[in-house]
Amino acid sequence: MTRHNTPVESVIFSGRKIPAYNLLSEAALSRIEDQADWILREIGVEFHGDATALELLAAAGAKINGKRVRFEPGHARELCATSPSEFQLHGRDPTRTVTLGGDNVVLMPGYGSPFVSDLKNGRRYATLKDFHNFVKLAYSTPALHHSGGTVVEPTDVPVNKRHLDMMLAHLTLSAKPFMGSVTAPERARDSIEMARLVFGRDFMDRNAVMQANINVNSPLIYDDTMTRALRIYAEANQCVCISPAIFAGAMGPLSPAAVAAQTLAEAMVGIALSQLVQPGCPVVFGSFHSSMNLRTGALTFGSPEANMTTMALTQLGRRLGVPVRSGGGQITSSNAPDGQAMQDSAGALWSTLLSGAHQVWHAAGWLEGGLVMSYEKFILDLDHCGAMLKLLQGFDTDDESFGRDAYRETGPGQNFLSTSHTLRHYTTANFEPRISDAGPYETWSENGSLRADQRATAQWRQMLDSYQQPEMKPGLAVALEDFVSERKAAMPDEWY
Amino acid sequence: MTRHNTPVESVIFSGRKIPAYNLLSEAALSRIEDQADWILREIGVEFHGDATALELLAAAGAKINGKRVRFEPGHARELCATSPSEFQLHGRDPTRTVTLGGDNVVLMPGYGSPFVSDLKNGRRYATLKDFHNFVKLAYSTPALHHSGGTVVEPTDVPVNKRHLDMMLAHLTLSAKPFMGSVTAPERARDSIEMARLVFGRDFMDRNAVMQANINVNSPLIYDDTMTRALRIYAEANQCVCISPAIFAGAMGPLSPAAVAAQTLAEAMVGIALSQLVQPGCPVVFGSFHSSMNLRTGALTFGSPEANMTTMALTQLGRRLGVPVRSGGGQITSSNAPDGQAMQDSAGALWSTLLSGAHQVWHAAGWLEGGLVMSYEKFILDLDHCGAMLKLLQGFDTDDESFGRDAYRETGPGQNFLSTSHTLRHYTTANFEPRISDAGPYETWSENGSLRADQRATAQWRQMLDSYQQPEMKPGLAVALEDFVSERKAAMPDEWY
């Protein structure tokens, strides 16, 4: 019996067809927006070590006092107004181009894990080989639309050279959109230079092909590393994603309302800066937030409080008129790809997608609060991504969907399996996951009583075995490799 | 470090505070309702072996042709109009009384499994001891509000005597509302008689204290076993829940739209019958439906198609003005309490609760498509029930929630953990699950690298160890036991 999957590839770019869920009332949203304005007027945001950023903000009318920047109510929001509500992020294969904003949904793999794990080899530091593997896996699945960024930390490469190998991998092993480096100005510039080798400078001056994640050093600080990277990408008219990062109770007050307001305040300031650098620069309203066990200090993911905050932030971002990167994704604090991991992850993805987020990081692989990228969890998450993409399509209520002819062929008590209506539709009616097992217990036992995570091992191996590298113009791969070699040769290794 | 849980007990009866998600537009809902009317006019529903039911329906104006009953468009809906949109289901401990309808949510354990499993003793036929255990567990947790019905099949008790032991358990080991037997008229009568010993006939003539699940023999057949039970409960003014049972593609066409329409059609007929027996009788619009792998015939649960159908049915039931028992719950086809089980279950519960269902069966324990009640899955599910109950409460956006004083105490870059705002709220801010582990990998490894299901074993044992039987008036337990003994002595054992 061959497996058959609904062609989710076609789902991806046809967009959401079910309404977004609105958790909060108009009144509640206004109160949160007012609190964001209060934060920006009364407390303000600090910019550390970037005089240019301060000058841009001062020229736009913000009140500057040393590093501290304050805004009159409504001012930061006004400065965001030139950012596009919807834009394309181009893949080097045009069929992989995605749209951010509107009714579109872009799912991405996990980001930033220093460790990987799989059931055979256990937990270990991530290497460039793992990085390559996850780029290949993300390219191979129709359930993800984006190659991601630091899908894992290639810890066997010197810190100051990792961005070169990571860019090379995204540009050659995948043809989906990707993220560039932000960890130092020269790394940001290298990332853009490498993309220009592939896409051309003219094209990139007019079109976004890559994203940069600008993390706020929450609470209320923009570091110069981040603002310089922001300015470099914005000047190149590439997409910046502004991501406040708040664990409720540590980097902000403990309540969902407060975290939502502070995230909005911090994000509006970064979005404003991007628009001052380059009006109309494509921007994403990002967030990363979660809850904590406030007695132990342990970080928790997929909690009801975090999920509510996720839903609130999507609403707030949509009101701001900027594509929203949700703070959710398939995230968990679990140390294994077990029931907890999938319970946490499923809830986080439901809150993310039902609320109408446009871009979802960490949609596959994340384990241990992000410390680990798990090969098996990645596969389990893909199944759920596919299922949710199917759900976002809703269902038809046209005449054909009701199958009146099937009732005429059968009648009370009869089976519909052999009706012509069923035969017309049975191959495409249902999303079919790859790992879920609906077979009988006896068969499952005879096959070794494998849990879902154990069944996932064969799947990621098979995907890597059958991976096919996307084509690239002759000479281009060489040019990219030459760029990497030259840049590497020009720098001594740095390991921290 | 002691564990602390948000007191979800208080959550339970304070009701949903976030809006219900409306998957379908007004136009789509109308089309499904029209299709339900088409089914009832063109195809009709059969009543097998119950002349009284046919007479009641004929007298109300339905068209009868042998067993087949047809309705003019809108007629079945009209006959449902006397059913209450909201009513109480009384516990013998009044603090356990629940309300069905409105903004209330009532969660229940799984129903009907012939097998149980736990990690130590494996998979085996369920016994009365297991039945007692699950009644005790459901009574002990604030995450469930109802004792359920056939929480497992007590297979060591003769079939014709099981209802007596099950009723005795619900009435003595729990004080939450429960379900009575429907599998034969005399068992239904016994169930009501036993409840009357506890609640009094007068009270029960005016108030519902129990529910009966009336399964439709879908497609489009009501068997006499079910309609007789329906009439017995409705005559006693106890709650009937009408549950069509449709696997898409087998007992109806394969599309969500068709399953929703057929479920609505079948349910309206049963609800109408209950109102003809006893106008104003409390009724629940139930459903049980799921999807199948249409190539293998395997039943699948938590699929996107089933979850969409769940959401649609909740909307349709709310429009009908009757409390809705969702077809969801924490259901899965997985053979183990693993990642698949929790991914399926979490999605099914999200679709159930976000869409606004009032009553949720199978909220805890269900495994293997309902063949198995798993002790460990029960515990994992309870965590998710608690989390979702917290989520249904939404969050405050009052002045206190924004923590302005915390910003004044701190400032950019500072930690909020020791602010007075955090100290005022940290013990109650977050729902804390019992099984989820957010601790570091090293500690987790040192403790044996236990998966979530493995950690759950200690929890259900501890809950059974610390179970405290609710008090009962002296003599009442004896009266119940005498009733059971007399009825058992009056019948030879029947094992099928």
Image (tube, coloured by chain):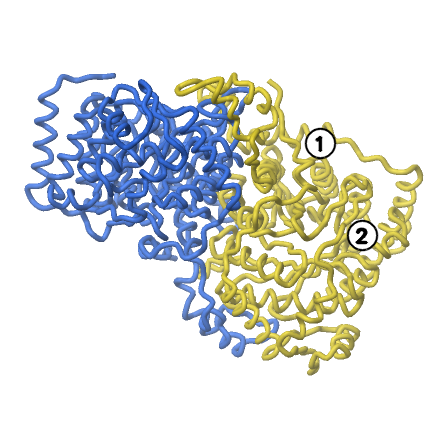
Chain colours: A yellow, B blue
Residues at marks 2 and 1, common chain?
A: yes
Horizontal side of A130 relative to A340 (left or right) equals right
Q: Nearer the viewer, residue B31 or A123?
A: B31
Mark sitting earlier along the chain (2/1): 2
Judge the density around disc 1: few (<14), some (14-19), many (≥20) Cα neighbours within 10 Å: some
Considering the image in quadrants, where does the C terminus of chain B appear?
A: top left
Q: Nearer the viewer, residue A427 or A289?
A: A427
Q: Where B4 sits versus A414, above or below?
A: below
Q: Amino acid at mark 1?
A: Leu
In the rendered image, which residue does mark 2 sit on? A161
Q: Where A382 sits versus B389, above or below?
A: above
| Quadrant hosting residue A36 | bottom right
| Quadrant hosting residue B173 | top left
Local SS, label 1: helix
Q: Where A262 sits versus B76, above or below?
A: below
Q: Nearer the viewer, residue A490 or A301?
A: A301
In the rendered image, which residue does mark 1 sit on? A464
Horizontal side of B453 relative to A103 (left or right) equals left
The residue depicted at 56 percent of the width and 48 percent of the height is: A19
Q: Are marks 2 and 1 in contact (CB under 8 Å)?
A: no
Residue at the extreme bottom: A65
